[in-house]
Amino acid sequence: MDSFINYYAAGDSHPFIMLIVFWLFWPGLAFIVAPIFESHKVYLGKGQSRLFFPGDFLLGIMTISLVGLCARNRIGWGFFHSVDYWYTLNAVMFILAGIGRSIDVQRYPKGSRESPTKFVHDFCGYYLCSFFIIGLGVPQIAWTIANPATFMPNIGLWRIFIMALLVFGLLGLHDITHLPTPEQLLLRHPDKYKPCWRK
């Protein structure tokens, strides 16, 4: 993880490069998986992408802003820089992601649960993004509380992170209070699909 943090701090353009690469991977990966493995296209701002893109867009902002905070406000605790911490976190998040996915897929039709876009969404959302946000965020928040003088010099990045987190939370609250219909669930992840080479 130190390599990501050091890359962020190595140049003024690096934060923007990291954010673009993050967005190209996720949610950009869904735009690649759908036409190849499900034989349908995902258009930006239409249909399926309207349901996942806003939240995943904010996850990228939260992740890179936390990388930036860790680059500008170096955490002095040794465990944060140890391989054991990240290996242990990886195992814990993998288990929690599996539990979260097993609960979430119950509302989907069986075919949708196993769709490639659903798998990619759950892997990136439940596991990968949570791994970075929790792994970086919890130690950084604890370090800032223990060293309050480091807060104000980094207030800009904290504002970006907090605003993205608040908007993400509001979107999540909307999803909870406006449960999707069966038709909307199928729009997110189809229950009938086939790879493009089996037309």
Image (cartoon, rainbow, N blue to C red):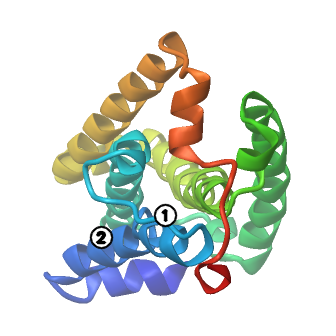
Label 2 crowd bin: few (<14), some (14–19), many (20+), radius 10 Å: some
Q: Is residue 3 shown left or right of residue 193? A: left
Pointer 1: residues within 10 angstroms few (<14), some, or many (20+)? many
Secondary structure beneath dot 2 equals helix
Sequence-wise, the earlier of marks 1 and 2 is 2
- Identity, as a three-letter code, of the amino acid under mark 1: Ile
Query: In the image, residue 117 lies at what x, y percent?
Result: 60, 60
Could you tell me which residue is drawn at 58 percent across and 80 percent down?
A: 196
Question: How far across and down, in percent of the image, does residue 69 sit?
Answer: 34, 60
Instruction: Please give the name of the residue rendered at 83% of the width and 40% of the height, measured from the top-left corner.
Output: 102
* Residue type, mark 2 in image: Leu
Instruction: Give the CA distance from mark 1 to mark 2.
Output: 22 Å
| 176 to 13, vertically: above or below | above
In the rendered view of the protein, which quadrant contains the C terminus?
A: bottom right
In the rendered image, which residue does mark 1 sit on?
A: 75
Left or right relative to 74: residue 187 = right
Q: Label 2: which residue?
A: 19
Quadrant hosting residue 123: bottom right
Residue at the far top in the pictured view = 177
Rendered location of residue 165, percent (x, y): 37, 36
User: On screen, 164 above or below 166?
Assistant: below
Quarter of the image with the N terminus in it: bottom right
Tell me the residue at 76%/44% (across/down).
101
Look at discs 1 and 2 and give the one toward the viewer. 2
Residue 172 position (above or below residue 189): above
